[in-house]
Amino acid sequence: MGLPMASRISLAGYPLTAWNRTREKAEPLLRLGARVSDMPDAARSADIVITMLEAGPVVLQVITSILPLLRPGTLVIDMSSTRQSEARQLHDLLRRHSVSFLDAPVSGGVLGAEAGTLAIMAGGSQEDFERAEPVLSVMGRPTRVGPAGCGQLAKLCNQLIVGGTISIVAEALLLAQAGGADPAAVRNAIRGGFAESRILEVHGQRMLDRNFIPGGQIKSQTKDLDNVLAAAADAGLQLPVTSLVTDLYHNILDTFSNADQTAALLALEQLNPGKRVGNAKDQF
């Protein structure tokens, strides 16, 4: 995700200095006019610092390491997917050093990042959002959803819907197959009705093809669903459907960690021995 997002920033004419823990992953940006640098140099003179990392603890580690180098008034935008509590912790840490912060996670995958059509959910002050909006807009459609931490909350709402809908589509296709119908024909028949969705269109087809080559991975979806439940607990909520879906993903986390999130179908098939959608060979 980070490479196509950074590419769009550079192509839009912004002076960009890039850093990656694995330097070679950032080097394609050199062809676009960006600089690739070690961490201190990348952060020292920046007006805006954008992070796109694996998880909250890694974000905190990186930001803490560069904190002494950030000038008062610098704006840090974390576009990773983390816990709401982690975003709030980072906001409080940076505020004590007069550094501004937005949590602005994204949805849309690599294709959305390449096309500049990401959904960007931002949490922070209106002033900081307006400052960041021109840069965020070259990557997609930014929307301020509330104060710091609310960007992550919105992303978790997104992942709740995605993870839950993938699981429901898997159940529908397996039911169609087990009941004697053609699951591909059932999918076509219900498209255009109230069941129509992007998940049914894209991930439903991937399930029929048994294409589990990763886009969004099982390990990422499981992490996000765990974070949904943590946010729900913080808000004093019980989310029974999300709890069931999270258990489904955990059931295959060790075996299919790097598979596409549509491998939720495999978890469902494990619960129903002898039942399988289609005859195609599994692709990983």
Image: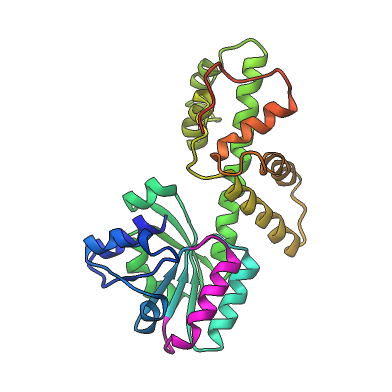
Quarter placement of the N terminus: bottom left
Q: Nearer the viewer, residue 67 or 178?
A: 67
Q: Is residue 46 above or below residue 13?
A: below
Q: Residue 213: x, y in percent?
A: 49, 36
Q: Nearer the viewer, residue 193 or 58?
A: 58
Number of numbered tags placed on the structure image: 0
The residue shown at (60%, 11%) is: 181
Q: Residue 52: x, y in percent?
A: 46, 63
Q: Is residue 58 magenta?
A: yes
Q: Nearer the viewer, residue 60 or 180?
A: 60
From where the camera sits, is residue 40 visible? yes
Apparent side of residue 119 relative to residue 64 in the rendered image (left or right):
left
Q: Is residue 120 above or below residue 110?
A: below
Q: Is residue 161 above or below residue 187?
A: below
Residue 127: name its quadrant. bottom left
The residue shown at (41%, 81%) is: 40
The residue shown at (42%, 86%) is: 73
Q: Which residues are magenta?
A: 53-74
Residue 35: name its quadrant. bottom left
Q: Is residue 72 magenta?
A: yes
Q: Nearer the viewer, residue 11 or 195?
A: 11
Apparent side of residue 123 relative to residue 88 in the rendered image (left or right):
left
Q: Residue 268: x, y in percent?
A: 68, 30
The residue shown at (49%, 40%) is: 214
Secondary structure mostly seen in the magenta stretch:
helix
Q: Residue 88: x, y in percent?
A: 61, 73
Residue 119: name its quadrant. bottom left
